[in-house]
Amino acid sequence: MKCKNCKSERIASVLANCEDTFQLEYLNQYYDGYVPEGIGLGDNEEGPEFKYCLNCGTIQGEFPIDEATILKAWEDNDEDEDEDHDPDDYEDNDEER
Ligand SMILES: [Zn+2]
């Protein structure tokens, strides 16, 4: 497969095994749970799955992702929402990387 941006064939595939501990921040909204479908990270229950180009950094897939799809991911997550979403948790995670 070739990169849709630069046509390089240096494409790496990622599957991160995190199951329901996936976290996402977007516009100061915080998501916890399984990877939501339709946001460009695959539909694998094991965790986020995507391909990216080692030449230009472009994540391969269907973009842009419309706002309604992202909002739907948040709505679906409301069912088993954690009461205490603490934005500080996410900042701590960033520091560990
Ligand atoms: Zn590329």
Image (cartoon, rainbow, N blue to C red):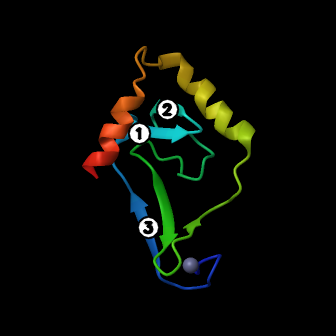
Q: Amino acid at mark 3?
A: Ser
Contact between marks 3 and 1 (CB within 8 A): the answer is: no
Quick check: is the Cβ at mark 3 less than 8 Å away from ligand 1? Answer: no
Q: Amino acid at mark 2?
A: Tyr
Residue 50, x across and y down, in percent: 49, 60
Q: Quadrant of the N terminus?
A: bottom right
Label 2 vs label 1, nearer the camera: 2
Query: Which residue is the site of mark 3?
Result: 13
Contact between marks 2 and 1 (CB within 8 A): the answer is: yes
Label 3 vs label 1, nearer the camera: 1
Determine whether 33 is above or below 11 in the image: above
Return the disc, 3 or 1, that comes first in the chain's sequence. 3
Return the disc, 2 or 1, that comes first in the chain's sequence. 1
Name the element at disc 1. Answer: strand
Residue 12, x across and y down, in percent: 43, 72
Q: Residue at x 39, y 24 (%)?
A: 86
Circle number at residue 31: 2
Determine whether 77 is above or below 27 in the image: above
Circle number at residue 87: none
